[in-house]
Structure formats: C-alpha cells, structure tokens
Amino acid sequence: MIRLPKAAVWALAILLAVVFVRAGITKLAGPAASGWAGRLAHWGYPPYARYIIGALEILGGLGVLIPRCRRSAAVILAVLMLGALATHAVYGEYPRLVPPLVLGGLAFALYASRLRPRGEQTPR
C-alpha cells in the first residue's frame, strides 16, 4: 500500500472525478455523444456501449469522492481504462494509449493508497 497524505488523496480523487464525470457526460449528451457512438461502432462495440461506459465513468468519478466507495470506484475506473488501453492497442492507435495509461495508473494509485495517520512520519 502507498501511504499518502490526506490532501494528496483528495487532490487525486478530485482530479479523477472531474476528468471522468466530464468524459462520461460527453458520452451521454451533447454534440460529442454522436461522435462517441461513431467511434465505438468503428471499434466494434454495440450502439448502447456509450451509455454503459458513460454511466460507469460518471458513477466511478463520483464514487472516488465518497471515502467509503473510493477503492471500489477506483477499480471501476482502472478497469475502464484497461478496456480503453486494449481497444487502442488492438486498433494500432498508439498515441491514444497515453491518456488511459495515465488515468488508469492514477486510478490504481488511488486504489492502492492509504491515508497516513496524523503525526506519522515518512520513513527516511
């Protein structure tokens, strides 16, 4: 387990929440939603996949803000990013591997983090 200060855990949770809630909304509504439908169809996913992925991104993004749900939500986000990583790798879209790799890594770091108890010093 990674021991992180409370502020670092919260900063990471807020960053992931903003990124994933925003990404989920673009898959569900607005002009970008039809673009996502086309991209997902190109990759061989069924038409309803954008709704499932978008809902999971929003729920995972909100879940990391709830301490009791944080680890489960982080796993959901990391698994979503593994799927994105695999999709881009299979289709040879190598520049698109970076965002899911970074976001999945951050989600895993949040999953693996433990708050450092007050007053505990980091080992030197």
Image: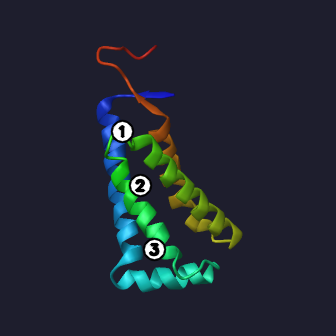
Amino acid type indicated by mark 2: Gly
Give how far across and how far down residue 59 sits, in percent. 38, 58
For marks 3 and 2, give the CA distance. 14 Å
The amino acid beneath tag 1 is: Arg
- The kind of secondary structure element at disc 1 is loop
Q: Earlier in the sequence, mark 3 or mark 1?
A: 3
**Residue under the image location 42 percent in, 29 percent down:** 114
* Cβ–Cβ under 8 Å for marks 2 and 1: no
Seen in the image, is 43 located left or right of residue 102? right
Location of mark 1 (residue) = 68
Disc 3, SS? helix
Count of numbered circles in the view? 3
Task: Please say which color scheme the image uses.
Answer: rainbow
Which of the 4 quarters of the picture holds residue 71?
top left
**Mark 3 vs 2, N-terminal side:** 3
* Mark seen at residue 60: 2
| Position in image of residue 19 (x %, y %) | 37, 59
Q: Identify the image quadrant of residue 90.
A: bottom right
Which residue sits at x=37%, y=55%?
A: 61
Relative to 10, residue 63 above or below: below
